[in-house]
Amino acid sequence: MKREIELYIHIPFCVKKCAYCDFLSSPADEAVKKAYVKALELEIAFWGQKLENTTVSTIFIGGGTPSLLSGEQMETLLQCVRRSFRVEKDAEITMEMNPGTVNDKNLIRYKKAGVNRISIGLQSAKNEELQKLGRIHTFQEFLDTYKAVRACGFENVNVDLISAIPGQTRESFEESLHIVARLEPEHISAYSLIVEEGTPFYEKYGDGKPKERDLPSEEEERAMYKRTKEILEKYGYERYEISNYAKDGFACRHNIGYWERKEYIGVGIGAASFLGKERFSNIRKIDQYLAYAKERSFEKMVSEREILDMSQEMEEFMFLGLRMQKGISAAKFQETFGCPLDEVYGKEIAKLKKQGLLKEKGENFSLTDFGIDISNYVFVEFMNK
């Protein structure tokens, strides 16, 4: 039986860490970038040998800021992937980039390397909001990047936006939505800001801080979320997942794979993987990662492992699947776990339907609009049974 996986490649470099960011990223010089790309090659080759005769259906190059790598370095990485795995002819190959970090020469090389989907981190069309987020670019620099990406022939582009930014009003967020939608990217990801521990934002806006902070209220945040769907629908975008909207045929295949629990390998520092019943992730320190790669000590790269039991797999099936607009299938649950969905979660489903949080269509269950508003409450209902 053919084994098919997704591949995630983590590029941890950035010009400057944003005030809200808790991702594994930091600035680095050219020597470190060069050594890191070589280490990635070695890790990719290791997995290619370990997972012999495996096909890669999607590749996602995330960060950090992957566009800090040169076109030549990106070609090197993707050539290594093709040497190590069978890559589907129509594989979706996504690369993240930040405005102001690319040029035409590198864009042409990225495309030649096989990148066919670009994800641009805009976050806001308002310069004052970008400054509050600690972004390194202006809206004009985003426009320049977007136009350059289009001019180089990329026909599948995502733009990221963030709502509930400090000082942001419903009106200013809606204006950002209209501005981006009029550019007609194929995909828009619209996330609500989460104040994460260990970030400058947490120091300023985290738990226990004064209530007169300038973050929008929960009511305003929900209103922004509701308006996102209403506005983007008018431009022809369909919400297919809690925070993701796409034109017909342009939903992100790689992310759908995560929500459908497809197997994937993550390479690079901090990258997570999911194979069989096991979830594991790499060490987070780049010096250790480089040393282990040089030694070919790939097993030492793993810092966390978890073998999922049946109960945990069922939980994941529910709360990951319910993120998507189509929801989860009772038939798929039975096929996967060998028992009826209502035998395991009948009481929880009945309760959530009565509360107006879940709806049923045929054999599928999905979140209602109200359920999406308080999705974390819904997900908890299926955990720790």
Image: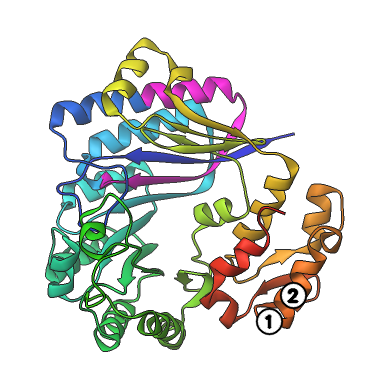
Q: Is residue 331 magenta?
A: no
Q: Is residue 53 magenta?
A: yes
Image coordinates for residue 87, horizontal then vertical, percent: 52, 38
Q: Is residue 239 left or right of residue 146?
A: right
The residue depicted at 42 percent of the width and 79 percent of the height is 225
The secondary element bearing badge 2 is classed as helix
- Nearer the observer, 320 or 38: 320
Q: 218 above or below 109?
A: below
Q: Are marks 1 and 2 in contact (CB under 8 Å)?
A: yes
Q: Which residue is mark 2?
A: 351
Check disc 1: other Cα within 10 Å, few if <14, some if 14-19, many if 20+: few
- For badge 2, the amino acid type reads Lys
Q: In the image, which disc is placed on residue 369?
A: none
Q: Secondary structure at mark 1?
A: loop
Point out which mark residue 355 bears.
Answer: 1
Kindly give the residue lying farthest to the top in the view shown. 295
Query: Is 220 situated left or right of 376 in this image?
Result: left
Q: Is residue 156 left or right of residue 70?
A: right
**Quarter containing the N terminus:** top right
**Magenta segment range?**
41-66
Q: Is residue 170 above or below residue 70?
A: below
Q: Residue at x 75, y 68 (%)?
A: 348
**Residue drawn 49% across and 59% down?**
252
Few, some or many residues within 10 Å of mark 2 (<14, 14–19, 20+)? few
